[in-house]
Amino acid sequence: MDSDFGVPRELSELQKKRAQYHPELPPCLQGITVRVEFGDSTTCADPSSTNVIGRAFPHTFGQPLAHFLRATAKVPDAQIITEHPPMRVGVLFCGRQSPGGHNVVWGLYKAIKIRNPDSVLLGFVGGTEGLFTQKTREITDEVLATYKNQGGYDLLGRTVDQIRTTEQVNAAMTACNDLKLDGLVIIGGVTSNSDAAQLAETFAEAKCPTKVVGVPVTLNGDLKNQFVETNVGFDTVCRVNSQLISNVCIDAQSAEKYYYFIRLMGRKVSHVALECALQSHPNMLILGEEVALSKLTIFDIAKQICDAVQARAEKEKYHGVILIPEGLVESIPELYALLQEIHGLHNQGILTDKISSRLSPWASALFEFLPPFIRKQLLLHPESDDSAQLSQIETEKLLAQLVEKEMNRRMEEGIYKGKKFNAICHFFGYQARGSVPSKFDCDYAYVLGHICYHILAAGLNGYMATATNLKHPVNKWRCGAAPLTAMMTVKRYSRGPGAVPVGKPAIHPSTVDLKGKVYELLRQKAPSFLMDDLYRNPGPLQFEGPGADAKTYTLAIEDQDYMGRMKKLQEYLDKVKSIVKPGCSQEVVKAALSSMASVTEVLSVMTTPSFGGHQPL
């Protein structure tokens, strides 16, 4: 093997102790027998996208939900699987490393081997490139020994993060056929799972026997929908970042002379920044979703910060901490438009050093206004999903410079009478995504690995492993599987009334809900965060003792048990059927008709396709 992936790690004493920790399984995953109950066929959250998705995915759209049951469950029509013939499964990391990814592999391996020791789990070395070139490593107890409950993706590694072109899809299918795989498990985020959905559809159409399963693993926390409450890695990254932010807050309060501008990794959306703000209580959070909704310019944002600095100075406070999501640059209208124009020129094959001369007049004026370091960063080639290289664009430095310039102007004009403004900038991302995973992420990833086997044992293709009720202890978790196509939407653009969906169906990043409970909590606390320095340090990751079982605010506050509600609804519908039967009284029939008419009228209004313009992310 010509790579260093999978080489046994030299573990510290702490890592050795963590490697000995064995995650708990919910009752529905315990034992050898697989019990699965199928629900009704699924649709998608946006009714206006249903026909588009159905046409694009005729073999995998509309598949039913699957619920995995504990041994004591009394479900007459449940499928009981007691025979477990040898199975060959491939697994790969597709997407940026996220703490807990190794435990998905461990959980899958354990689930396969306890049911049939002759089953084989093959890891693709180098992610998708390994899949295309059939570079594999058999996963064994020895290979896994130093990777259990550990961070990173270096058990197998990763490379390009896509399976999209015809050539790539065909190479993947050839690999699965040549290796005689019964299943292919893809570990990744929104882009990777969109690719997994397309792969599953192509395999079904070509009658390839390999079943494709997706696993929601991404530190960004943006693969959230009615079926997925959170992602593997999000808990860890927010805890690690929050401790770093808290350390900086204490330093700022101690020195009393610096404003820290901290940009946080998290791609286009602001979930990580929002969670970290609630955990560490910095003075300000610039939320990308707020900026996009209010159409704030870069100067509007700088003014907001300057006003906050001046208000704090009036209380003799000359320090502070400001959080900035890395996706902010794509939320600012003029910068997003500039990026789109630059990316369009890249796609036309224009050389990087020639792009500035090909910009439109307004874009050229904005480009020339920006500091040289930002110009260089905006000209970088876009990522595989056509987004900007957000981790490389130092928005925090741009804002710090603009704020410093404005505060100097206010001081010269006598508007600001405080001390000179000083800024220090940081980018937190790589420090957290390589961390050892939290206890929650270890448990969650391991459980999802087991669910992947249950999905394959049930013969399902194009599904994502899901666990819900996650804010409760592991023994209360509900395990199941949801079709990837049920999570899809079609991007729509504001092109006037009656705009129709354009673009390809995909699983899109979930943005921060500005009507949600977590955002509302931030709004309530923001004024005191700004002025009162209520800095909070959540402390380091713990596997035992106080804080070990703490959940993120994002998970604990939101009431997200969609799968549980669907099961409860089905129970009510079944109960109605058992009561309203031929021969029941007229009064019962009348009451049922009246109630059902009212319910269906409300639901019909709520699910009417709305073609109001939606801005692309």
Image (cartoon, rainbow, N blue to C red):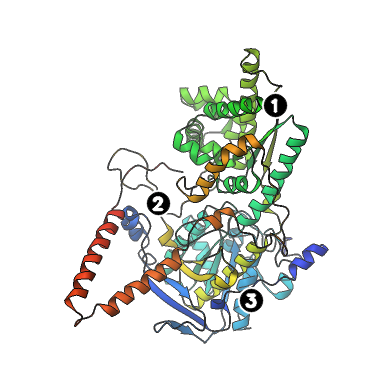
Task: Name the amino acid type tagged 1.
Answer: Glu
Question: Which circle's residue, 2 or 1, is located before the other in the chain?
Answer: 1
Give how far across and how far down residue 357 sits, in percent. Answer: 52, 25
In the image, 573 versus 362, the foreground residue is 573
Q: Is residue 255 above or below residue 491?
A: above
Identify the secondary structure beneath mark 3: helix
Q: Label 2, label 1: how many angstroms apart (C-alpha)?
A: 54 Å
Q: Which residue is mark 1?
A: 316
Identify the secondary structure beneath mark 2: loop
Q: Label 3, label 2: how many angstroms apart (C-alpha)?
A: 37 Å
In the image, 241 versus 553, the foreground residue is 553
Give how far across and how far down residue 604 sits, in percent. Answer: 27, 57
Q: Is residue 363 above or below residue 144?
A: above
Q: Label 1, label 3: how many angstroms apart (C-alpha)?
A: 59 Å
Q: Residue at x 61, y 27 (%)?
A: 311
Q: Is residue 145 above or below residue 556?
A: below
Mark 1, other Cα within 10 Å: few <14 / some 14–19 / many ≥20: few
Q: Which residue is mark 3?
A: 110
The nearer-to-camera label among 3 and 2 is: 3
Give how far across and how far down residue 156 sits, in percent. Answer: 67, 63
Q: Which residue is mark 2?
A: 504
Tell which residue pokes out farthest to the left in this image.
586
The nearer-to-camera label among 1 and 3 is: 1
Q: Residue at x 36, y 62 (%)?
A: 43
Is residue 261 visible from the viewing direction of this image?
Answer: yes
Task: Name the amino acid type tagged 2.
Answer: Lys
Is residue 9 visible from the viewing direction of this image?
Answer: no
Give how far across and how far down residue 260 sits, in percent. Answer: 69, 35
Question: Which circle's residue, 1 or 3, is located before the other in the chain?
Answer: 3
Q: Is residue 160 left or right of residue 428?
A: left
Q: Is residue 536 left or right of residue 556?
A: right
